[in-house]
Amino acid sequence: MNIISRLTEEFKLKKFQVENTVNLIDEGNTIPFIARYRKEQTGELSDVILRDLYERLIYLRNLEGRQNEVIRLIEEQGKLTAELKKEILSSETLQRIEDLYRPYKPKRRTRATIAKEKGLEPLAEIIMSQNINQGSLDEIAAPFIDAEKEVNTVEEAYQGAMDIIAEVVSDNAEFREIIRKIVFDKGIVITSASDDKADSVYEMYYDYKEPVKVIANHRILAINRGEKEKFLKVKIESPDDEIIDVLKSRVVNNDKAITTSYLISSIEDGYKRLISPSIEREIRNTLTEKAEEQAIKVFGVNLKPLLMQAPVKGKVVMGFDPAFRTGCKIAVVDETGKLLDFTTVYPTEPQNKVEEARKELINLINKYNVDIIAIGNGTASRESETIVAEMLRDLDRKVYYTIVSEAGASVYSASKVANEEYPDINVSIRGAISIGKRLQDPLAELVKIDPKSVGVGQYQHDINQGRLDETLKGVVEDCVNNVGVDLNTASISLLSYVSGVSSSVAKNIVGFREEKGKFNNRKELLKVKRLGEATFVQCAGFLRISDGDNPLDNTAVHPESYDVALALIEKLGFSTDDIKAGKLKQIDSIINEKNIIKFAEELQIGVPTLRDIIKELKKPARDPREEMPKPIFRTDVLKMEDLKPDMILTGTVRNVVDFGAFVDIGVKQDGLVHISHLSNKFVKNPMEVVSVGDIVNVKILDVDVEKGRISLSMKEV
């Protein structure tokens, strides 16, 4: 297999792009590093394409490895033919390879193997040959009757032979491929209630049918969960008669043979007993894998904008973790995220100490000049929001509040990371600290939490956890390296996602910083234990040092390009001090698309890299998150009862799923914009229209206060 050619064709890329990318991966370079600092070699491939290409590379290499393994195993049995070898090597899926290997795969004792032990294989071959058109069935079977082998009658002889034929039919790779396609095209997924028919969220599936070829991914995951929780029974109904007719047309070539009835019975048995259950399992597995891949993709696509939310810098924030019985946890953090104070108040049921809570909150707001209150969106969120909104009216200055996703805050609170950060702070208070800090810098705070716990997907606990972890880690890694990390303030959690930096090296960086003081330049990284030259190359460009020895250390310019950057600065008549002063903002008036090639040739550097250097020199310490939508700050609150059809509101997209998007419009329940109402145009995938964190205008379609449901539309708003 020529993997490079396959990847080139599948991804519609140029050969040099694939060859160079594969070489860079094999040399141990990370995807963020390749995407950012090896653009000339990859032809400027994005991190998304690079990750997809990497995954496909792994699959094709596994495919190639399995091809070679299966060829070896069959060859050891002395059954490998040139034709079979060619078929295995031309297989494009692991499924096809397994189909071809099936007849040669060691089996546990089956009815067929027992029949072979009884010496009935020659009788099976006679039946399959279909050459005997006359004579007696008893005469054909007579030579195989042997009491010692427990074949006592003609019927037992024919039954054993039929068992062998049934397995031969079942093991035929071509037949399985044909049947698999028929079931995919014409099969029906049928679900029914389990015996007790208990009330559950799966009631719509208690009597449900849908064609295999069109069933939605999220329904597959819902059905799987319902089956696992024993609320549902699931089966795939196949066109059995049609499939058996297809098999007979390919096996039976002589209707006149006196053994034909045995052959037909063998085919029917082989299909119903062996092939059908196996194909049903395969198809359900395939549907599940496809649904899981989509769910993982949804999770990853949703996670990225959540991590890349615009930070709220330079503000004193009060983190407000709502609750009922146990009280609302409050934490005040300064502009840098340092904890200033914390408390617990009880304005909600059952205590209802509203006035006492108001006084305590107002005291903290005035004492620390709080600018914004970040309210978690969990239990008692809207009740707390009402209390906060009413309290803000009594203040002498403008203080705003906003709703912040608290997904994963409780997981963080009890984590080892939180215990190391706040060893003397109660677990319950840590959640409020996290809520406040994730408004100030969502990325820095959210990386401390297992990405699965952030909760921006669907059925995340039902899907392949290893695959999900791998994908989400890649998303976090890309976000962290896209933004860059302050070397002198970053936590171990944040540093662990930097290109090339392992968790142990991240700990060593923080340990070095605590022992020696702040880093003054990137070169000092080489003094960190276990951070060698190779790791330095991978990570240095993503680590920032503000107010260090070299202003280039506060940019995404890689140290390997410092000489070029300095030469460019000198050529343009500037100095390194001018970088800090922001005097290179007008560099575009000197270097433009017309003469950038000339500059690149003079500096002996690629145009993409030079373009990136120029971008950094113009705006050092640039934060790409500044271009993202800002949180909605409020001073008053809406109730669900206030909502009326046709009202136009502004909200924040909290989650995007296959069937639409959930939008926080400032009431207790997020509203659903169904996929059919996302746009005036046809929408195949909601992610084409909205992302988590987007600020959108929506129109109220319907409100069901009793069920807590709000239907929204983004059409003509």
Image (tube, rainbow, N blue to C red):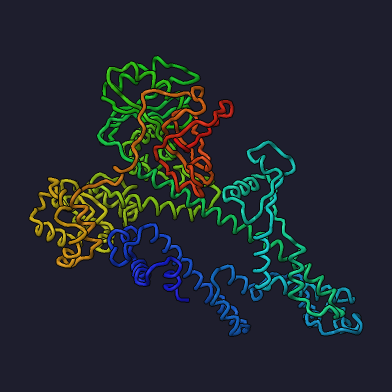
Q: Position of residue 510 (x, y in %)?
A: 27, 48
Residue 678 in view here: yes
Residue 360 in view here: no
- Identify which residue, 420 or 472, lies in the foreground: 472
In the rendered image, the vertical position of residue 260 relative to residue 489, given as above or below: below
- Residue in the picture at 67% in, 45% down: 230
Whether residue 633 sits left or right of residue 642 in the image: it is left
Q: Position of residue 396 (x, y in %)?
A: 28, 17
- Residue in the picture at 52% in, 77% down: 68
Q: How many marks?
A: 0
Q: Position of residue 539 (x, y in %)?
A: 27, 57
- Identify which residue, 440 or 644, lies in the foreground: 644
Residue 84: which quarter of the image?
bottom right
Whether residue 67 sits left or right of residue 476 in the image: it is right
Q: Position of residue 408 (x, y in %)?
A: 44, 40
- Identify which residue, 171 or 704, lies in the foreground: 704
Residue 8: which quarter of the image?
bottom left
Q: Quick one: quadrant of the C terminus? A: top left
- Identify which residue, 427 or 582, lies in the foreground: 582
